[in-house]
Amino acid sequence: MAKNRKNQAAAIRFGPALKASFLCLLIGGSAVGYVWQKNEIYQLGQQIGQREAKLKQLQYDNKQLADQLDILHSPVMLDQRARELNLGLAPATPMQVVRLTETPVTPEQPSLRQFAQRPVADLTP
């Protein structure tokens, strides 16, 4: 005898519908994930672009400030600024200059090779 469709179990009838809904859910989830990933890549690209622009601006500002510092440290500018502030500064006269000569260190003079050597005090009474 042939089986009647009405007598089939409900699980057998829902099988194809369940497979189709699972497949639709899988494809829909993949599509949502793809769009989300593309959006994240776009936002990260925007952040990288902004940070690169900020880095260029900071490098430019740093160069400008370094150039300004070089100008302010120049002897001509220091002399001009001292005159503006009426500090009463003048070049040193030859009598005010003290020249120190450095003696060469030789291996025969061991005391000159050591810095700040003090004699050790005898602590015994």
Image (cartoon, grey):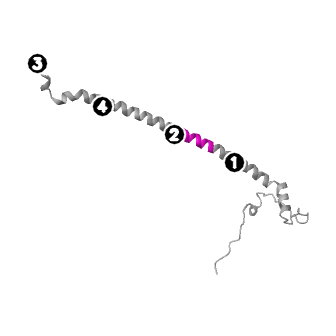
**Amino acid bearing label 4:** Phe
Q: Earlier in the sequence, mark 4 or mark 3?
A: 3
Q: Nearer the viewer, mark 1 or mark 3?
A: 3
Q: Is residue 40 magenta?
A: no
Gap in Å between the C-alphas at discs 4 and 1?
Answer: 58 Å
Gap in Å between the C-alphas at discs 1 and 3?
Answer: 89 Å
Residue at 73% x, 48% y: name it. Answer: 64
Q: Are marks 4 and 1 in contact (CB under 8 Å)?
A: no
The residue carrying mark 1 is: 61
Q: Badge 4: how crowded within 10 Å, few (<14), some, or many (20+)?
A: few
| Residue 22 circle label | 4
The residue carrying mark 2 is: 43
Residue at 24% x, 26% y: name it. Answer: 16
Quadrant that contains the C terminus = bottom right
**Amino acid bearing label 3:** Ala
Gap in Å between the C-alphas at discs 3 and 2?
Answer: 62 Å
Q: Are marks 1 and 3 in contact (CB under 8 Å)?
A: no
Q: Earlier in the sequence, mark 4 or mark 1?
A: 4
Range drawn in magenta: 43-54
Gap in Å between the C-alphas at discs 2 and 1?
Answer: 27 Å
Q: Secondary structure at mark 1?
A: helix
The residue carrying mark 3 is: 2
Q: Secondary structure at mark 4?
A: helix
The picture places residue 71, in percent across and down from the top left corner, at: 79, 52
